[in-house]
Amino acid sequence: MRVQSVLLILSLLALLCVSLNAATKVSDDKIYDQVKIKLATDSLVMGVDFEIDVKEGVVTLSGKVRTQKQKDRAERVAKKVKGVAKVVNKLVVSL
């Protein structure tokens, strides 16, 4: 009987953890909005016309930047957004 009680409690805890994890997952739309805002307000990369795509937490940045520093900064800014699992940086340095 005691073993069954422990198994029941562990099962309920596992379900609770799964439910909490699903509830805290950030939607791709929210990630897109936050990345767009963060890039638009960053002093080094503001004004650059980025193309942003988000799929299952993976952010893909594409477009043209003027310097390698801007390219690197855009990636770092995007990585800091809550819910971002990975950033694929396809930005091209072009004068």
Image (cartoon, grey):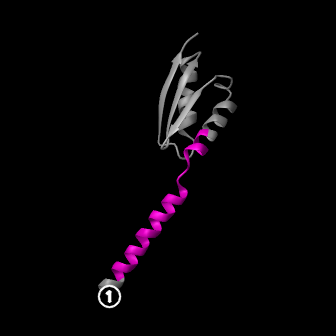
Q: Is residue 20 left or right of residue 36?
A: left
Residue type, numbered disc 1: Arg
Residue 24 % position (x, y): 54, 57
Residue 12 in the magenta stretch? The answer is yes
Is 21 colored magenta in this rendering? yes
Q: Badge 1, how many Cα within 10 Å: few under 14, some, many 20+? A: few
Residue at horizontal 38%, vertical 75%?
Answer: 10
Element on which disc 1 rests: helix
Q: Main secondary structure of the magenta part?
A: helix
Given residues 26 and 77, the one toward you in this image is: 26
On screen, residue 63 above or below 80: above
Splitting the image into 4 quarters, where does residue 66 fall?
A: top right
Q: Which residues are magenta?
A: 6-32
Q: Determine whether 21 is above or below 88 in the image.
A: below
The image quadrant that residue 63 belongs to is top right
Q: Is residue 8 left or right of residue 37?
A: left
Which residue is the site of mark 1? 2
Q: Is residue 82 above or below residue 18?
A: above
| Residue 40 x/y as whole percent | 68, 31
8 relative to 38, above or below:
below
Position of the N terminus, as image quadrant, is bottom left
Q: Residue at x 42, y 74 (%)?
A: 12
Residue 78 rendering spot, x and y as whole percentages = 56, 36
The image shows residue 55 at horizontal and vertical percentages of 49, 40
Quarter residue 64 falls in: top right
Q: Residue at x 36, y 84 (%)?
A: 5
* Quarter placement of the C terminus: top right
